[in-house]
Amino acid sequence: MPEILFLVHRAPWPPDRGDRIRSWHMFEALAKLAPVHVAALADNDADAALARAKLAPLCKSLAIEGRRVSRPIALAEAVLRREPVSIHLFRSKALARQVDALIGRGDISHIVAFSGQMAQYLPARFDGPVLMDFVDVDSAKFGAYAKQDRRQPLNWVHRREERVLGAYEVGIARRVAASLFVSEAEAALFRQKSGLAADKVLAVGNGIDTDRFDPALPFDPVGHGDGPLAVFTGQMDYRPNIDAARWFAADILPLIRRRHPAARFAVVGRAPSAEVRALAKQPGVIVTGEVPDVRPWLAAADAVVAPLLLARGVQNKLLEAMAMARPVVASAAAATGIDAAPGEHLLVADDAAAMADAVCMLFGDRDAAAHMGQAARARMIARYGWDARMAPLGALLGLPA
């Protein structure tokens, strides 16, 4: 009987952030193919407890260890060992021992590793198929950071990580049966970097639960106020989200408020950094912090914005907003990889003036905004069901669906 080992850098429950949404649905898809053993890390004890309670009844076995390595220690160890910092941040001797013991028993026939940080737990030799879901080309992200931070003291860290992590990613990809990425754009970039062919580097895109993200469901009112509301959602200690929120609040919202003086901007997401919390001092800006459910805020939005200056892969925040029939204004970086037509299913704008114009158009023409939102939801229903998105896993693993 086949048995699958699923290695995950963050335990895939609750599915309340982009990586865990993808890994949860991947776990569900794998569990339909064969019994699954999950070996995962958790950012803290609370996350670990939630994941254990949910996953334990669903797994053949479950191992979750908390992450204990600080960034300064990870940086020092990585430099000394000439390894990527990203790998050290997710290194756990306790989890490695459990994975080695599990593989040593001989029951595991297939391995799926989620996120490049988990490649370090792959055995040196394994007879069965191994899939590596990199999701994004992380090394390219650090290259973008390095270009943005040329004058910052730690710029050399990003330049080093781009180089060292890039070589690590290619080395892993050459060992495994196939490497997966969240979009064709990411897959094409990695093929170019690695020299590997399309049969070894594939796109398996994200989906959306359109039954859960349904504007027809009843939601408690949020965001009380008289002015039109733009909403940005995300993990708000994540640097690209921080930069996006700051840019919108500082450069875009003032342009909008010249035409819509009561316009408001809500930053909705867990763990807002000090920089993000400070935005609430500006006129019209709301910073919610963690909310139990993002859907009421999406339902309340007159426009959902994604002003990301740096984005990799597919933005789940956009899929959620579009499934909720909200009109979306996104940067070109945020819209990359979304199977939707600009001007029909969403608006794309890259500079502050263009983004302000797009938001003001939606605020001023409610009929056009509603029409775009309905077109966006129809697109999500037609193209983004999770079952269809994860369907290739069975064939890639050689397991019948």
Image (spheres, rainbow, N blue to C red):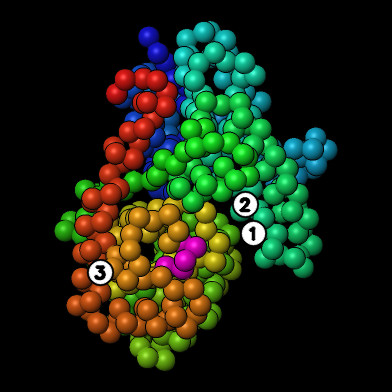
**Cα distance, mark 2 to mark 1?**
6 Å
Asked if the residue at tag 3 contacts the one at tag 2, i.e. Cβ–Cβ closer than 8 Å, the answer is no
Which is nearer the eye, 288 or 116? 116
| Residue 262 image-quadrant placement | bottom left
**Cα distance, mark 1 to mark 3?**
32 Å
First along the sequence among labels 2 and 3:
2
Query: Residue 350, how many percent across, how many down?
Result: 49, 73
Amino acid at circle 1: Ala
First along the sequence among labels 1 and 3:
1
| Residue 363 image-quadrant placement | bottom left
Judge whether 10 appears above or below 55 on screen.
below
Query: Residue 371, how many percent across, how many down?
Result: 20, 71
Amino acid at circle 3: Met
Look at the numbered disc 2 and give the secondary structure of its residue. helix
Q: How many marks?
A: 3
Q: Residue at x 48, y 33 (%)?
A: 199
Secondary structure that dominates the magenta span:
helix
| Residue bearing mark 1 | 144
Q: Please indicate whether residue 304 sits to the left or right of residue 76 in the image.
A: left
Q: Quadrant of the N terminus?
A: top left
Q: Which mark is on residue 372?
A: 3
Asked if the residue at tag 1 contacts the one at tag 2, i.e. Cβ–Cβ closer than 8 Å, the answer is yes
**Cα distance, mark 2 to mark 3?**
33 Å
Image: magenta residue range:
330-334
Q: Which mark is on residue 140?
A: 2
Amino acid at circle 2: Ala
Judge whether 289 appears above or below 122 on screen.
below
Q: Residues within 10 Å of mark 3 (few under 14, many from 20)?
A: many
Query: Residue 34, how many percent across, how many down?
Result: 35, 19
Q: Residue at x 42, y 23 (%)?
A: 397
